[in-house]
Amino acid sequence: MANPFSNRKKVRGWKRRLRELERFRRAHRELDLDALRRSGVVYVKLWLDPWSRLVPRDPPVWFRRRVLAAFLDVLRSWNRALEAAGEPFYLRLWLFDPRFHRTQVVAAVGGRIAWYRNAFEPAPGARPVPPPHLRDPAYDLAALEWEPCLDTDVLLEEDAADRGGLRILRRATRVKHTSRGQPLFLFDRGFVWLGKPAAPERPGA
C-alpha cells in the first residue's frame, strides 16, 4: 500500500490545485476578530495538500507566486479590519525562503504582541526585500515594509538523542545559552522576511 503521507509522488491536477487555492484564499480573507481577541493570535498557513502533509514540501516556484498573491490578499484584508477596530495590533506576512511551506500571515493583539515582535532574530546581512524568484507582476512586494530575519531551528541537548545525538549537535550553526545557562543549539535554515503594509501618510505627521 502506498504511504498516504509520502511527498515523493508527482503532483498532478494543477487546475484543481488552483481552484483549491482560490477557495483557501476566500475562506481566510475575512479576519475573525472575536477569535483573535479570545486567543490573542490568529494565523493562516498553506493548508493545502500535498504541501502541508506530515512531511511538508515546497510547491514549484510558479505556484509559490500564486500562493503568495493569496497571502497578500489576506494580509491587506486583515489590515483593513484591524485598522478599523482601532486597537493596537501586530500583523505580518512571514515569507520564508527556501522553506516556503512555512510562510503564513500572523495577527496578534494584547499581551501576545510583544512575543511576536521578538519571535525572530534579525539578519542584517540578508537582502532587504524577498528574493527575485518570488516577485511577480500580479503584486508589488515593494509596497510592503520588510524586515529580514533568520529562519532557525532550535534544539535542546536532551532532545538530540532521537535525532543522532552529538553528531547532530556538531552541525549546529551557533550555540546560545538561556538565562539559566542551558545551551540552545541553533540551526540556520534560511531567511524569513517579515512584511507589513506600509503605514499611510498622515497630514501633519
Image (cartoon, grey):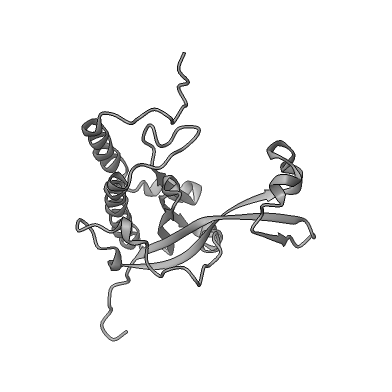
Q: Residue visible at 32% across and 55% down?
A: 75
**Based on the displayed image, in which of its 4 quarters is residue 134 positioned?**
bottom left
Judged left or right of residue 83, residue 89 is right
Residue shown at 54%/61% (left/top)?
Answer: 120
Toward the right, the furthest residue is 181
Nearest to the observer: residue 4 or residue 121: 4
Asked if 191 appears above or below 22 in the picture, the reply is below
**182 to the left or right of 102:** right
Residue 157 screen position, x and y as percent? 75, 48
Residue at 33% in and 31% down = 11
Where does residue 136 sit, x and y in percent of width and height?
Answer: 24, 57
Which residue is at the front of the view, 204 or 90?
A: 90
Q: Percent position (x, y) of residue 150? A: 52, 61
Residue 131 in percent (x, y) is at 36, 61
Quadrant holding the C terminus: bottom left
Q: Nearer the viewer, residue 65 or 48?
A: 65
168 lies left or right of 40: right
